[in-house]
Amino acid sequence: MHLHKYEKIWLFSGVGALILFLVVLGYGAFYMGTHPQSHGVTIDPENIEAHDAFKPENLGLTKVEEGKYILNIAASAFNYDLGTDEEGKAVKHIRIPKGSTVLFQVTTKDVVHGFNLAGTNINMMVEPGYVSSMEEVMDKPGEYTVVCNEYCGTGHHQMFATVEVYE
Ligand code: CUA
């Protein structure tokens, strides 16, 4: 096929502009990483126990010092694993004294889940391979429901836990 000289120039500058656009877009989207900072810690989703925070005995609420807690949660389809109580029963309700600083650390063993403490600004996307964390001062008493706000399958709406902040 014979192309006129000007057609060639237009064709090349068009392709060039497209490549430049894609390079700029790719650079902007991926240069600093595609994940928000809270996802900086990586983890093997098939072996979350390798990470100290997600060893079975470390799941749930741990008091670090007076007024300071860590809450470790292992999400999976379709459950929030908060460890077990003395009787070996799955913990579904967490009680935190008002005014406490709580470091929430959440990961997933399978698909993407959400971790939203309804009525607060604690809202994280939980992606396989990452630990989502957020520290928050719990100064409003009440009972908060943990909601999975990422559709994760048929049991999505069954994912449930509650956090109570008491005076
Ligand atoms: Cu987990 Cu939706």
Image (tube, helix red, strand yellow):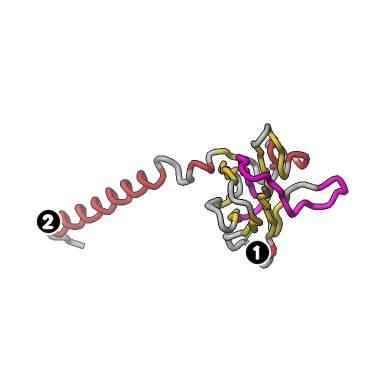
- The part of the image, by quadrant, that contains residue 119 is bottom right
Using the image as rendered, state which of residue 85 and residue 111 is in the foreground.
85
Which residue occupies 68% across, 52% down? 164
Residue at x 71% of width, y 43% of height:
61
Q: Which residues are magenta?
A: 85-114
122 or 76, which lies in front? 122
Q: Quadrant of residue 53?
A: top right
**Can the viewer see residue 124 in this picture?**
no
* Residue 49 falls within the magenta-colored stretch: no
Furthest residue in direction right, as rendered: 87
Ligand 1 picture quarter: bottom right
Secondary structure at numbered mark 1: helix
Mark 2 residue crowding within 10 angstroms, few (<14) / some (14–19) / many (20+): few
Residue at the image point whose x is 35% and y is 45% from the top: 28
Q: Position of residue 14 (x, y in %)?
A: 22, 56
Q: Is residue 144 above or below residue 66?
A: below
Residue 13 position within the rendered picture, expressed as x and y whole percent measured from the top left? 19, 53
Quadrant in the picture for the N terminus: bottom left
| Amino acid residing under circle 2 | Lys
The residue pinned by badge 2 equals 5
- State the residue in front, 110 or 37: 37
Residue 136 percent across, percent down from the top left? 56, 43
At 13% from the left edge and 60% from the top edge, which residue is drawn? 4
- In front: mark 2 or mark 1? 1
Left/right placement of residue 90 relative to residue 119 reads right
| Ligand 1 lies under 8 Å from the Cβ of mark 1 | yes
Q: Which residue is mark 1?
A: 156
The type of residue carrying mark 1 is: His
Does residue 44 appear anywhere in the picture? yes
Horizontally, residue 56 falls left or right of residue 5, namely: right
